[in-house]
Amino acid sequence: MVITTLDLNEKYKNYNDINGKIKRDVEKGILFPLVRGIYETDCSTEGFLLSSYIYGPSYLSFEFALSFHNLIPERVVIYTNATFNKRKSKIYRNHYGVFTYRDVPETAFPFMVKAYVEGNYAYFIASPEKALCDLLYIKKPVYSIKDLKILLFDDLRINEEIFEELNFDDLLYLSNKYISTNLKFLRKYIESEFKYDNYPTND
């Protein structure tokens, strides 16, 4: 379970040297530091369960979430997270892995993120549509639908069949929440090649 220095101060209030006790527990493998002032007590906890405790507000997104939702074939070992208004990317390394945090627009941040509870842990992860939009937002701009398709299916190795099963209503809604050339071309791509297969028209 996640425990803070404040929790430990209360737990060890009868010790003369609380900081010394905490240090010894770390050395003995009883406590595992996540970031300053926050610890985990179980060495085998999955890293994705800890992301939001390390730095926040945040949610799992980008490559990790795309892998989680099986949109890309690779298993992503870095826990990639989205934040907003931090203005500086962060990276943390600890016993549980590597955790990265980078901004997306505040206007996009709260949408289509689902909270899960697993045991004593709560974690937050982007929908596949949101993770894709977040990742396109941070990628180098493309300047045509053709180049976007190369980015999606060649460079990022998005599974085309699974892409076509995404909720295009959600993608179109989300694409307007970013000021991004890539998201503009994603919107054009969907509207030009999928609109009549997936959406009712006014005709």
Image: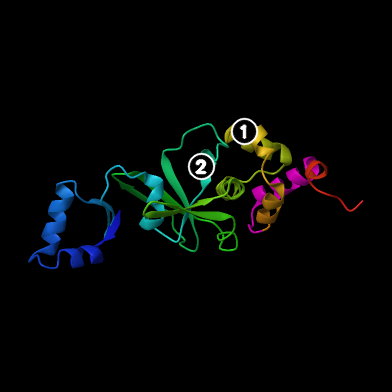
Magenta stretch encompasses residue 128? no
- Kindly report the distance in space between the C-alpha atoms of the residues bearing marks 2 and 1: 13 Å
| Secondary structure of residue under mark 2 | helix
Boundaries of the magenta span: 177-194
Q: Residue furthest right?
A: 203
Query: Label for residue 34?
Result: none
Q: Which residue is mark 1?
A: 159
Please say if 72 is above or below 90. above
Q: Which residue is mark 2?
A: 63
Q: Residue furthest left?
A: 16
The disc, 2 or 1, on the residue closer to the chain's N-terminal end is 2
Task: Point out residue 4 in the picture as x, y percentages from the top left corner.
Answer: 27, 61
Q: Is residue 187 left or right of residue 62?
A: right
Amino acid, disc 2: Glu
Local crowd size for mark 2, using a 10 Å CA cut-off: few (<14), some (14–19), many (≥20): many
Local crowd size for mark 1, using a 10 Å CA cut-off: few (<14), some (14–19), many (≥20): some
Magenta stretch: dominant secondary structure: helix
Amino acid, disc 1: Asn
